[in-house]
Amino acid sequence: MLNSTQMLNSIYLNQSVQTQVRDAFSNATPIPSITLYETLNLTTLTALCESMLTLHFKHTKNPLLYSFATVPLPQNIQKELSASLLPFVSYITKKKRTKLSLTAYKLSWKDYQILHDSLQPQKSTQIIIDLTPVWNLEAGGTITYVDGTGEYLSVPIKNNTLTIIEKNKDVNHFIQYINNKAKTQSRYFLMGTVE
């Protein structure tokens, strides 16, 4: 479907840039993380955004915990993304990565996820690929990681960003309620773990 041997923007293939990214990730405190902009090449980004519109999202809701639509990312897309992302994330995090597990999310008006331990995986490296072409920031929908000490990390809502977060057992996340300013817009992103 994506038909691209190298999905990353060519700037991120440069060894010097990769080293700078790895250093920035290693030095990030209190939550080791980095957000990279214009991460995917244009061909890959276009194909991913188009595929998001054809996926059959299932809306699930537990009023005390969350409301959003998800679908497991098709295996062919998962495999193609893995080929480009696993070596890159392995280098950035200084850990050999062999498995990428991503879920596609679609959030619209009235969607959210509260901060709750039962919804969070334990220690892991998480990635988020934002695929929302246009979004009114006043509508909400920000993904925020907190570490239990009052420190937090808000993931930017920006198309074609890749965020890598090294999550320990004390770090959880929530998704800000999406209000009526979203109108008919939906927010799309891929979220998952690398192992």
Image (tube, helix red, strand yellow):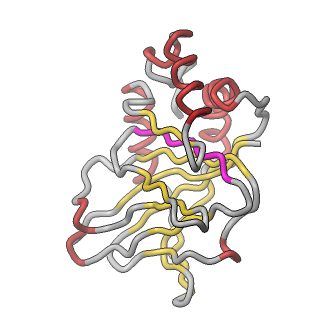
Q: Determine which quarter of the picture holds residue 96.
A: top right
Q: What stretch is highlighted in magenta?
A: 161-167
Magenta segment: does it hold 166? yes
* Residue 153, placed above or below residue 16: below
**Percent position of residue 121, x then y:** 72, 63
Total numbered labels placed on residues in the image: 0
Q: Determine which quarter of the picture holds residue 39.
A: top left
Residue sitting at 58 percent across and 66 percent down? 149
* Residue 59, placed above or below residue 142: below
**Percent position of residue 26, x then y:** 62, 32
**Percent position of residue 64, x then y:** 55, 89
Q: Is residue 82 left or right of residue 37?
A: right
Residue sitting at 56 percent across and 53 percent down? 191
Q: Is residue 84 left or right of residue 157?
A: right
- Most extreme residue toward the bottom is 63
* Residue 57, placed above or below residue 95: below
Q: Main secondary structure of the magenta part?
A: strand
Residue sitting at 64 percent across and 61 percent down? 171
- Most extreme residue toward the top is 15
Which one is nearer the viewer's eye here, 175 or 22? 22
Which one is nearer the viewer's eye here, 55 or 185? 185
Residue sitting at 66 percent across and 73 percent down? 119
Magenta segment: does it hold 11? no
Q: Determine which quarter of the picture holds residue 97.
A: top right
**Percent position of residue 114, x then y:** 52, 77
